[in-house]
Image (cartoon, rainbow, N blue to C red):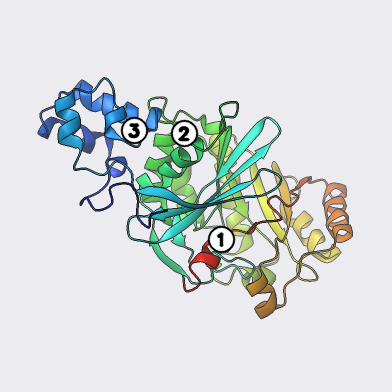
Amino acid sequence: MSAAPHGAAQSGPALTELSDDALLRLVEQLGGKPFQGRQVLHWLWKHGVDDVEQMRNVPAKLREALRPHRLRAAEVREAELAQDGTEKLLVGLADGDAVECVIIPDGERTTLCISTQVGCPVGCVFCASGLGGVRRNLTAGEIAEQVLLAKARLPDDRRLTNLVVMGMGEPMLNLDALLPALARIHDADGIGMGARRITVSTSGYPRQMERFAKADESYNLAVSLHAADDELRKQLVPTATHPVREIVAAAHRYFGLKGREVTYEVVLLKGVNDRPSHAETMIQTLRGLPCTVNLIPWNPVDEIRRERGLERPLEAHVDLFAEALRCGGLKVTVRRQRGADRSAACGQLRLRRQPGA
Ligand code: SF4
């Protein structure tokens, strides 16, 4: 296990961090032809190679010239496999920091959850990722590479079917890197994952959601609502400065532009936001909108439970909450806990390995 990605001693950005144009220019500077630059891009993103020698149809002279350049910006530093097959990866970055991504097999589906920032500025009270604030944005290469790293770990009979951008960080606060990363992940000449299979989650930044809506592709949007009442939401998401109605209006505009039904994520905490009155406020706010509410009983993080006294809600209360929303006319799903015997909650593995992070 090394602390830095493959070839990290080499200087400059990794090849995966270069835009297509920048990579083609570099190949040209090294004496290669434009079509050879495109071959290199294919090897990097479509085939996911992590060694220049694996680029078989690239001439030996160009491979030699590429050798001083790092191929990748990230590597798997540690992996934790839960009994249900969920695998959490601690992804090491060239500067020594780390983020998490999670591979979640579920029947025919295999979903990958990726991160967009080192740490998170949003500071949701129940989340380990936000405990130390944010350190920096990930680059587009670091975001997209998590998909390559995860794909390389799948057995031959499994393929990645879905991607959720719900890991560490607030995606809407790093759109400059996220949008090119998603284009790379979606591009048929890149990783080639359909936009319908990609979901980006936000804790609610209306202006950035408008910009996200202008992306060429129609990705799915999820909004982490947690509570429909502004005061309660501010307690759960202390940096939330936008009223719920503005966030819901921005999400509805996204639906209008893209035709993609929005999912509202609600992390349920015992006695905090899991009562019938909270369900009622949610019904009042979302009734009639084309959306689904995804209820997520909190995955306890010991440090947070001790310090903040938060608890996982009772199953019976989760069921009652879901039933109330359904009776109120909303579509509801309940996400049951995955990876329960491991560091299941977002940011937990990194917290354990980098306690000061
Ligand atoms: S739940 Fe998401 S938005 Fe909230 S602190 Fe954690 S990573 Fe950030």
Instruction: Give SS at disc 3.
Output: helix
Q: Position of residue 216 (x, y in %)?
A: 43, 34
Q: Residue furthest front?
A: 1
Per the image, the residue denoted by label 1 is: 349
Label 2 to label 3: alpha-carbon separation: 22 Å
Residue under circle 2? 217
In space, the residues marked 1 and 3 are separated at their CA atoms by 28 Å
25 or 293: which is nearer to us? 25
Estimate the x, y position of residue 244 in percent, counting from the top left: 63, 61
Task: Give whichever of discs 2 and 3 has the lower sequence position.
Answer: 3
Q: Is residue 256 above or below residue 11?
A: above
Can you see residue 207? Answer: no
**In front: 52, or 245?**
52
Q: Which residue is mark 3?
A: 44
- Measure the C-alpha gap from mark 2 to mark 1: 32 Å
Q: Horizontal and vertical percent for residue 304?
A: 64, 73
Q: Residue at x 29, y 26 (%)?
A: 55
- Name which residue lies at 33% across and 46% down: 6
Tell whether 69 sits left or right of 254. Answer: left
Amino acid carrying mark 2 in the image = Glu
